[in-house]
Amino acid sequence: MNDKSYENSVLRPLALMLHTQLSELKQLDEALQQQTAKTKEELSELKRLDEALQQQTAKAKEEQRRADALQQKLEAILDMEMKMIEREQTTPPKRR
């Protein structure tokens, strides 16, 4: 088939339309692949940030637990001191 007969074919407009659509689909596919790669990178970053947040949360909970335990110990010591002071005030002085 020669080039002239192909140019005059009734299928030429359809072929041109299909070619245009194929080109557009290729562009859309490339854009979609780029967006997919970007989304994967963002998801990876979010996972990394989530892990870091979970570690910080666990660390903060542990620090709070330690702070609570130290506060209880401090309160116990203060309570013992108060009881010692009360005993000293209520017991008569020792005679020599």
Image (cartoon, helix red, strand yellow):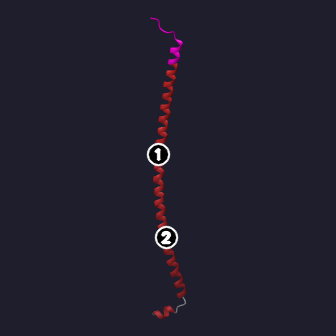
Kind of residue at badge 2 = Ala
Q: Residue at x 54, y 83 (%)?
A: 17
Q: Nearer the viewer, residue 68 or 23?
A: 68
Task: Measuring from the top left, give residue 51's x and y in whole percent.
Answer: 46, 50
Q: Nearer the viewer, mark 2 or mark 1?
A: 1
Q: Nearer the viewer, residue 65 or 20?
A: 65
Task: Measuring from the top left, give residue 24's x and y in whole percent.
Answer: 51, 77
- Quadrant including the C terminus: top left
The outermost residue toward the top is 96
Residue under label 2: 31
Q: Is residue 38 above or below residue 4?
A: above
Q: Is residue 91 above or below residue 26?
A: above
Q: Nearer the viewer, residue 89 or 44?
A: 89
Q: Residues within 10 Å of mark 2 (few under 14, many from 20)?
A: few
Task: Measuring from the top left, give residue 28's x and y in whole percent.
Answer: 51, 72
- Are dots 2 and 1 in contact, CB under 8 Å? no
Q: Is residue 45 above or below residue 28?
A: above
Residue under label 1: 56
Magenta span:
84-96
Task: Measuring from the top left, give residue 62's x and y in whole percent.
Answer: 47, 39
Residue 87 lies in the magenta-colored region: yes
